[in-house]
Amino acid sequence: MIFLDATCPLVSKVHIEAQRHYDQGREILLIGHKGHPEVVGTMGQLEDGVIHLIETTDDANNYVATNPKNIALVTQTTLSVDDTADIVATLKSRFPDMAMPHKEDICYATTNRQSAIKAIAKRCDLLLVIGGNNSSNSLRLVEVGKKAGAIDAVLIACADNINWDMVARAKTIGLSAGASAPENLTIEVIDALKKRYRVYVEHVEVTKEDIVFRLPRLLREPINA
């Protein structure tokens, strides 16, 4: 039997950071959403009660530290960049000696998509975000779009979920997708719009993504039967 670790390398990085802080005797705070699979997984890496979850700025303001000078911070990788920044700022103001992640914990794909949403939101009568209802980074894109000025912003799983009444009221439609949504879903949404309307597609790019994660060795090499 062959087992492969399919954990995202960026999530694994957070696990390693949490373990390192634990080994160094630090009190660990995790910014994230209760019940999210990634948060459950990260907290499950260590003993119960070792990692303390912070969901909001109120949590950050009310947290009672055992040792305020020996605290470390890690975050869920699929959070709203702006909301997380507010929580981090609150924690830093209360615990200035808090150990921060060596590099940003929030996934680069999540960050880039939020930046792209901010770049187009004010132009959008309707913003469509492709992703699952359990996808944290997709839900955050909808929130970011609304805050950044989109008149309407909704999450859809695929082209079959398009609300055509909302589309009919819109002249300019923005389209994005969660970090794990396959590209064919985006193509299908555009094709569905083209079947009903004359569509002009404008690609808005805010950054180039050139990060590549190598497949596990067992998937790169032929397996002898």
Image: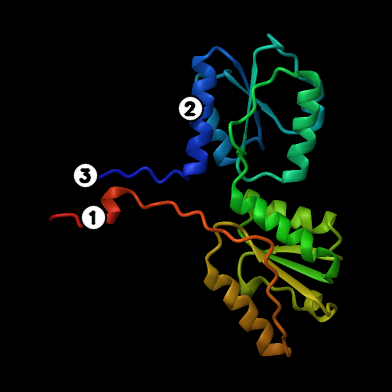
Image position of 166 (left or right of 41): right
Image quadrant occupied by the N terminus: top left
Image position of 219 (left or right of 126): left
Ranked by sequence position, the earlier of labels 2 and 1 is 2
Q: Label 3 vs label 1: CA separation?
A: 16 Å
Ranked by sequence position, the earlier of labels 3 and 2 is 3
Q: Residue 110 versus residue 104: which sits nearer the camera?
A: 104
Q: Label 3 neighbourhood size at 10 Å, few (<14), some (14-19), many (20+)? A: few
Which is in the foreground here, disc 2 or disc 1?
Answer: 1
Image quadrant occupied by the C terminus: bottom left
In the rendered structure, which amino acid carries the disc numbered 3? Met
Image: 24 above or below 121? above
Q: Label 3 vs label 2: CA separation?
A: 24 Å
The percent position of residue 136, horizontal first and vertical second, equals 64, 48
Label 3: which secondary element: loop
Label 1: which secondary element: loop
The percent position of residue 52, horizontal first and vertical second, equals 64, 23
The percent position of residue 23, horizontal first and vertical second, equals 49, 16
Image mark count: 3
Q: Which residue is mark 1?
A: 221
Q: Which residue is mark 2?
A: 45
In the rendered structure, which amino acid carries the disc numbered 1? Glu
In the rendered structure, which amino acid carries the disc numbered 2? Gln
Which is in the foreground here, disc 3 or disc 1?
Answer: 1
Specify whether residue 100 is in view: yes
Q: Residue 41 versus residue 7: which sits nearer the camera?
A: 7
Ranked by sequence position, the earlier of labels 3 and 1 is 3
Image: 83 above or below 143? above
Q: Quadrant of residue 125?
A: bottom right
Q: Which residue is mark 3?
A: 1
